[in-house]
Amino acid sequence: MNTKELYQQIILDHGKNPRNLRKTENFNKDAKGYNPLCGDKVHIYLKLNENKKVEDISFEGQGCAISMASASIMTDLIKGKEEFEVKEIVNDFLDMIKEKDKLNNNILGEDDKTKLMCLSGIKQYPMRVKCATLSWHTLTSAINNFKEEINTEDN
Ligand code: ZN
């Protein structure tokens, strides 16, 4: 199996069986996002503890395989991280998906980085980049307590 096939298989797996697809009980941060170009919808729930560590993160929503896989992989990686680490991972991912060849953060291990790199092929399809980044922008919105729904066509 080559890298491209491995990447596709991981995306398919997460797209079909999304992790953390539920609503966190006692969440203290949340945000909604919508990508009208594709119809993807996501609602991110976050529970930060008193040390600003992500005790739980989950999502509800529906959309294409890319948007679901991206939210699934993201929530998997973010759980247990500190708030400042979350911000660094989000920025690194968004840079990678838009222009860089690799991830530069020192927070994630190689296995986790491989899962994120599965989405790197999306770069060639600008329309689909919004599917992949929707949940990440929505996570940022939740952490920063923005009340408005994220709309990928608003920037
Ligand atoms: Zn989509």
Image: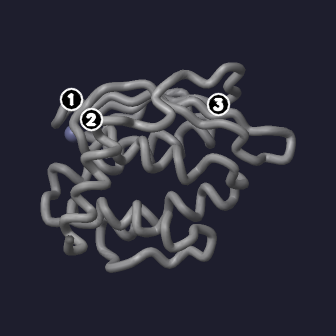
State ligand 1's quadrant.
Answer: top left
Q: Give residue 37's quadrant in the image.
A: top left
> Which residue is at 40% across, 62% downward?
116
Compute the Cα span from label 3 to label 1.
Answer: 24 Å
Instruction: Report how many numbered discs are placed on residues in the image.
Output: 3
Would you say the beta carbon of the disc 3 residue lies within 8 angstroms of ligand 1?
no
**SS state under label 1:** loop
* Residue 119 x/y as whole percent: 30, 60
Q: The residue under label 1 is which amino acid type?
A: Gly
- 73, 83: nearer the viewer: 73
Q: The residue under label 3 is which amino acid type?
A: Lys
Would you say the beta carbon of the disc 2 residue lies within 8 angstroms of ligand 1?
yes
Q: Give residue 125's quadrant in the image.
A: bottom left
Which residue does the numbered mark 3 point to in the structure image? Answer: 29
Question: Could you tell which of marks 3 and 2 lies nearer the N-terminus?
Answer: 3
Which residue does the numbered mark 2 point to in the structure image? Answer: 35
